Image (tube, coloured by chain):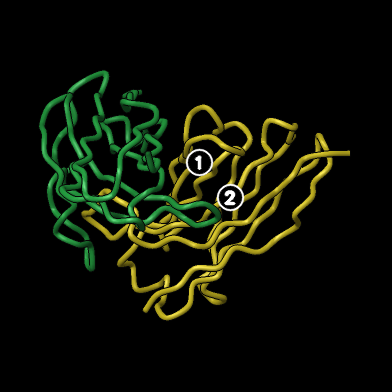
Chain colours: A yellow, B green
């Protein structure tokens, strides 16, 4: 059974870069069966899709965040990562990593989420 | 970008009652690209319905999805205590983007 686990700092200062990693266990990113995404949820609010990456490195980002987002993959470590630059308090949220199978368009794999607070 | 609007914002019902949740899209969505999730406090969303009407693995048959075009519905036939949660619809669009509705909170009356 594939499991996802987010990791990274829970506190980031304004104007700095938020960096999170998602470790995939129970399956190989390199198998190519899944696309890997980041999704965030502001406190008490709904869900916002950030972007996805395929094992090959191809990516697609939410246009509203595109200028600040980089998603990368490390197949040797079975991980994918999120970098969000120039953060402000508005980027405070629970960040989830998630996955969806090829030719599906829904997220059937989710990490437990990690809260990132942007504050000085 | 396709905007999904869920209604009502909050639904207050009692266990055993029927729940009907609505998701309306700002433009037509392929049924294949419409999903529903359940989220409980402190947990990640859980996939309930995909393809507008197919139940995900392990989802009880009291959950059903229907609809097409711009109007989609999640129905819970007989509410169990564990069904009280927040529900989100989600779509994948031609712009290659995923968007979610703002959620419906299902609370115990």
Q: Is residue A84 left or right of residue B98?
A: right
Considering only vertical position in the picture, is A46 above or below A24? above
> For numbered disc 2, what is the local secondary structure?
strand
Relative depth, front residue between B85 and B28:
B85
User: Which residue is at 59% across, 58% downward?
Assistant: A81
User: Which residue is at 60% across, 40% downward?
Assistant: A69
Q: Quadrant of the C terminus of chain A?
A: top right
The residue that disc 1 covers is: A50
> For numbered disc 1, what is the local secondary structure?
strand
Q: Is residue A4 left or right of residue B69?
A: right
**Which marked residue is nearer to the observer: mark 1 or mark 2?**
2
Considering only vertical position in the picture, is A79 above or below B24? below
Circle 2 marks a residue in which chain? A
In percent of width and height, residue B53 lies at: 12, 47
Q: Quadrant of the N terminus of chain A?
A: bottom left
**In the orientation shown, which residue stands out farthest toward the right?**
A120
Q: Contact, CB < 8 Å: mark 1 with mark 2?
A: yes
In percent of width and height, residue B88 lies at: 35, 40
Relative depth, front residue between B86 and A8:
B86
**In the orientation shown, which residue stands out farthest toward the top?**
B26
Q: How many marks?
A: 2
In percent of width and height, residue B36 lies at: 28, 45
User: Which residue is at 56% across, 64% downward?
Assistant: A22
Q: Tell me if residue B11 can be seen.
A: yes
The residue that disc 2 covers is: A95
Question: From mark 1 to mark 2, how far is it between C-alphas?
Answer: 9 Å
């Amino acid at each position: 059974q594939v499991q996802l686990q987010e990791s990274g700092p829970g506190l980031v200062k304004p104007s700095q870069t938020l960096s999170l990693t998602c470790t995939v266990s129970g399956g190989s990113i390199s198998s190519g069966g899944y696309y890997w995404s980041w999704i965030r949820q502001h406190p008490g609010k709904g869900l916002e899709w950030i972007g996805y990456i395929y094992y090959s490195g191809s990516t697609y980002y939410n246009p509203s965040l595109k200028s600040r987002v980089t998603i990368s993959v490390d197949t040797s470590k079975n991980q994918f990562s999120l970098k969000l630059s120039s953060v402000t308090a508005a980027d405070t949220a629970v960040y989830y990593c998630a996955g969806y199978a090829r030719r599906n368009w829904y997220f059937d794999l989710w990490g437990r989420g990690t809260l990132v607070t942007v504050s000085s | 970008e396709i905007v999904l609007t869920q209604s009502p914002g909050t639904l207050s019902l009692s266990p055993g009652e029927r729940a009907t949740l609505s998701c309306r899209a700002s433009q037509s969505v392929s049924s294949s690209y419409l999903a529903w999730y359940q989220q409980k406090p402190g947990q990640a969303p859980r996939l309930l319905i995909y393809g507008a009407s197919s139940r995900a693995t392990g989802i009880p048959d009291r959950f059903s999805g229907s609809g097409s075009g711009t109007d989609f519905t999640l129905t819970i036939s007989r509410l169990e205590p564990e069904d009280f949660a927040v529900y989100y619809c989600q779509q994948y669009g031609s712009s290659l983007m995923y968007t979610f509705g703002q959620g419906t909170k299902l609370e115990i009356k």
